[in-house]
């Protein structure tokens, strides 16, 4: 059981972050924000995938304008992503954004950061304070020689103190290093010194397998240490994929229950059925159901009895069919052609009983 770091509670729209609250899954739209048709449709898909807060880029006035519609439309909080043009932060807040993300390092005037923070305080808007290796302050670069983990953590601590000196506490911090190890260390240093909630992610993790592995390892290490109040998996892919991977990471660590958790074997020479086909059919049949259930689908009886005893329902396949399990006990033998429908029926019954 992972012991989560104790953090202060903050508010993002109607959601609470930190404290005892579950880790929040975020993602970001990849559309031009002002293209309302495309953005709203992507927001729909993200919400359907389980995304709990959505960030949209606000590089220009037309995007800030579009926020007015987006905020009204979305059933989850909207965070405006601001870079280099601080004026957009004010427009986004005025448009009703529930949160804004700023990197003080790329707003080169401290007075402007102060004004943004005071406006967020006045409107009770959540701020994500971002620090990354590409926009580290000059004096820290001189002190450490390069954007080391220590330098990143120090920058985040300095800016956090500045926010707090203005009487503003409704913020979380994100520290993004250039690689997994630097990222881990920087977050660890920061986490030890404060109770400020942390948003974690591996920035620019990449595409496909590489992106998923990098994110899983980077986020997995931090989450295992109890660090992380909100997460984003950054992938060069559809944002819904980010949400799917984020949940799989959280589920694998027992930090979130959402959807079906299928335990299936890698298959080997003992296999007697087309297991990938069975798993795909079950996944497909349950993908839109809001069920929290562990299903074991094993290629033969070798490991099935042990695995099935930890699952809610399961199939142990054998020549011509499978043994159907529920709560670790064999219910009956089912034929190969009926095994998927029998399993789905048992899942249905399971939900009627619990
Ligand atoms: S459960 Fe059976 S088929 Fe699957 S990998 Fe193990 S031994 Fe092979």
Image (spheres, rainbow, N blue to C red):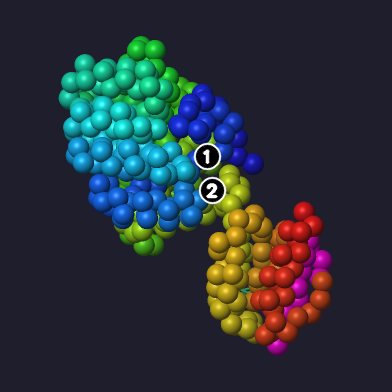
> Which residue is at 32% across, 17% downward?
118
Residue 77 appears in the picture as rendered:
yes
Image quadrant in which the C terminus is located: bottom right
The kind of secondary structure element at disc 2 is helix
Dot 1, crowdedness within 10 Å: few (<14), some or many (≥20)? Answer: many
**Vertical placement of 257 versus 18: above or below?**
below
Marks 1 and 2 sit apart, C-alpha to C-alpha, by 8 Å
Q: Are marks 1 and 2 in contact (CB under 8 Å)?
A: yes
Q: Position of residue 197 (x, y in %)?
A: 46, 29
**Vertical placement of 164 versus 23: above or below?**
above
> Which residue is at 66% across, 58% downward?
293
Q: Give the residue at mark 1.
A: 23
> Which residue is at 73% across, 58% downward?
351
Picture quarter with ligand 1 = bottom right
Q: Which mark is residue 100?
A: none
Q: Is residue 146 left or right of residue 156?
A: left
Q: Quadrant of residue 316?
A: bottom right
**Vertical placement of 13 versus 306: above or below?**
above
Q: Position of residue 46 (x, y in %)?
A: 43, 52
Q: Position of residue 119 (x, y in %)?
A: 31, 20
Q: Quadrant of residue 86?
A: top left
Q: Is residue 139 left or right of residue 206?
A: left
Residue 89 appears in the picture as rendered:
no
Instruction: Tell me which segment is drawn in magenta.
Output: 317-330
Q: Residue 264 in magenta?
A: no
Q: Give the residue at mark 2.
A: 250
Q: Position of residue 11 (x, y in %)?
A: 48, 28
Q: Report the mark closest to the observer, 1 or 2.
A: 1
Labels 1 and 2: the sequence-earlier one: 1
Image quadrant in which the N terminus is located: top right
Q: Quadrant of residue 260?
A: bottom right
């Amino acid at each position: 059981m992972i012991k989560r770091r104790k953090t202060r509670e903050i508010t993002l729209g109607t959601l609470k972050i930190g404290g005892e609250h579950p880790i929040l899954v975020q993602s970001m739209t990849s559309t031009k924000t002002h293209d309302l048709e495309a953005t709203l449709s992507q927001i729909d898909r993200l919400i359907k995938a389980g995304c709990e807060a959505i960030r949209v880029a606000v590089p220009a006035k037309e995007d800030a304008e579009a926020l007015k519609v987006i905020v009204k439309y979305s059933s989850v909080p909207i965070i405006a992503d601001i870079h280099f043009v601080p004026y957009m932060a004010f427009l986004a807040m005025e448009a009703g954004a529930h949160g804004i993300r700023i990197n003080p390092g790329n707003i080169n005037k401290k007075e402007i950061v102060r004004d943004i923070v005071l406006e967020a305080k006045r409107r009770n808007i959540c701020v994500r304070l971002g620090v990354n290796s590409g926009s580290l302050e000059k004096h820290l670069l001189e002190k450490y020689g390069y954007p080391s983990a220590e330098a990143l953590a120090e920058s985040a601590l300095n800016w956090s103190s500045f926010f707090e000196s203005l009487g503003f506490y409704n913020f979380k911090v994100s520290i993004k290093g250039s690689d997994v190890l630097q990222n881990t260390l920087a977050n660890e240093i920061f986490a030890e010194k404060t109770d400020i909630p942390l948003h974690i992610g591996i920035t620019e993790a990449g595409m496909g397998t590489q992106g998923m592995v990098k994110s899983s390892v980077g986020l997995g290490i931090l989450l295992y240490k109890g660090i992380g109040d909100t997460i984003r998996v950054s992938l060069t892919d559809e944002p819904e994929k980010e949400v799917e991977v984020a949940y799989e990471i959280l589920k694998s660590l027992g930090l979130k229950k959402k959807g079906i958790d299928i335990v299936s074997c890698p298959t080997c020479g003992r296999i007697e059925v087309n297991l990938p086909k069975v798993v795909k059919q079950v996944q497909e049949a349950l993908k839109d159901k809001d069920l929290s259930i562990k299903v074991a689908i094993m290629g033969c009886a070798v490991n099935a009895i042990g695995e099935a005893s930890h699952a809610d329902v399961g199939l142990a396949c054998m020549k011509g069919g499978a043994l159907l399990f529920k709560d670790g006990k064999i219910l009956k033998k089912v034929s190969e052609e009926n095994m998927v429908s029998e399993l789905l029926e048992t899942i249905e019954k399971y939900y009627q009983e619990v």
